[in-house]
Image (cartoon, rainbow, N blue to C red):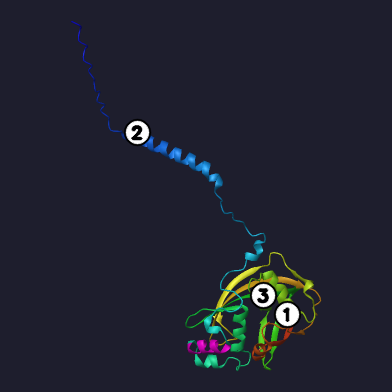
Amino acid sequence: MSPQPKPITTTTHHHHHKPKTLPDLFLTTALSLLCLLTSSDKSSNSLKVPSYYLPSNPRRFLKIPTMSRTKNNSHNFAATPHSLSDWLRPRLPPDSFASWGVKPGTKNIHNLWLELSEGETSLADSTPPVRSVNVVTVRILKNDKILIESRQELSDGSVRDRCRPLSEKMKPDETPEEAVFRAVKEELGSIVSGDVVRIVPGSYFKKVEERDSGSYPGLQGRYVLHSVDALVEGLPDEEFCTEEADEYSHSKVEVDKAVCVQRHHWKWEIKSTTRN
């Protein structure tokens, strides 16, 4: 009798997994993050990163952005001089608004509309409205004296006292330096040329004033004043008068309705150490 084969027995080993401890979880998480970062570094070469640059001429960004100075006025209420007048009338004292262009030395609604259209001025949509304007003041020096505009002759025949250095509203996107040369050309250009102007280095000074407007009675004003000292060759030693150049590029019809400066009267005074 042949021997019987031994039965094959299968032994099953049961593995009992221990729960992972806290350090094991930290190690697993760290390894996962490392793999993720490694894979992202390889794919980042194909990403395009936007680049940024600084302006090559930082002086153009020295002006204080106190108001919107976009040319072609965007205020709906100032689409025309008439609509601007309708908007202002209930927001200003009646007597004050009625004196615009009537009281000697004041301007009228067409002047304000031209300022808004040229971007020289902005109006806050408030009651009362606030007119904001950037102004360049040029302190023209000669020895120990400073040039002062004593008065202006206006197109309506009136005379306006000034008693201040040469001052001019700034145009949109205009630097103080550019405004200086334009102001000299417009107000003194009838007797000197613009290439004789030299700005004194380090003389730039800025301040902000809030006061009633002399040109527009009853209208509050916020003035950002950019002041520089300058030397201008060829000016007379005694009192003198200059003719005003054309100020606005709008149609002659609107400009003719405005009260414009025709002549400037100048004199030299002993220079003060204070700023006007």
Q: Secondary structure at mark 1?
A: helix
Please state the horizontal and vertical placement of residue 139, each as a whole percent of the image: 70, 74
Q: Residue at x 67, y 83 (%)?
A: 163
Mark 3 vs mark 1: in front: 1
10 Å crowding of disc 2: few (<14), some (14-19), many (20+): few
Secondary structure mostly taken by the magenta-highlighted segment of the chain = helix
Does the segment drawn in magenta span residue 143?
A: no
Find residue 180 and report its image quarter. Answer: bottom right
What separation in Å lies between label 2 and label 3 (alpha carbons)? 74 Å
What separation in Å lies between label 3 and label 1 (alpha carbons)? 14 Å
- Whether residue 193 is visible here, answered yes or no, is yes
Q: Say which label, 3 or 1, has the lower sequence index.
A: 3
Q: Residue at x 43, y 40 (%)?
A: 33
Q: List the residue tagged with mark 1.
A: 186
Marking on residue 137: 3
Q: Residue at x 48, y 87 (%)?
A: 91
Residue at the far left: name it.
1
Q: List the residue tagged with mark 2.
A: 24
Q: Is residue 39 left or right of residue 264?
A: left
Does the segment drawn in magenta span residue 89?
A: yes
Q: Which residues are magenta?
A: 81-90
Seen from the viewer's position, the closer of residues 226 and 190 is 190
Mark 2 vs mark 3: in front: 2
Q: Amino acid at mark 1?
A: Glu
Q: Secondary structure at mark 3?
A: strand
Q: Amino acid at mark 2?
A: Asp
How many numbered marks appear?
3
Please state the horizontal and vertical placement of residue 23, each as a whole percent of the image: 34, 34
Q: Residue at x 54, y 80 (%)?
A: 75
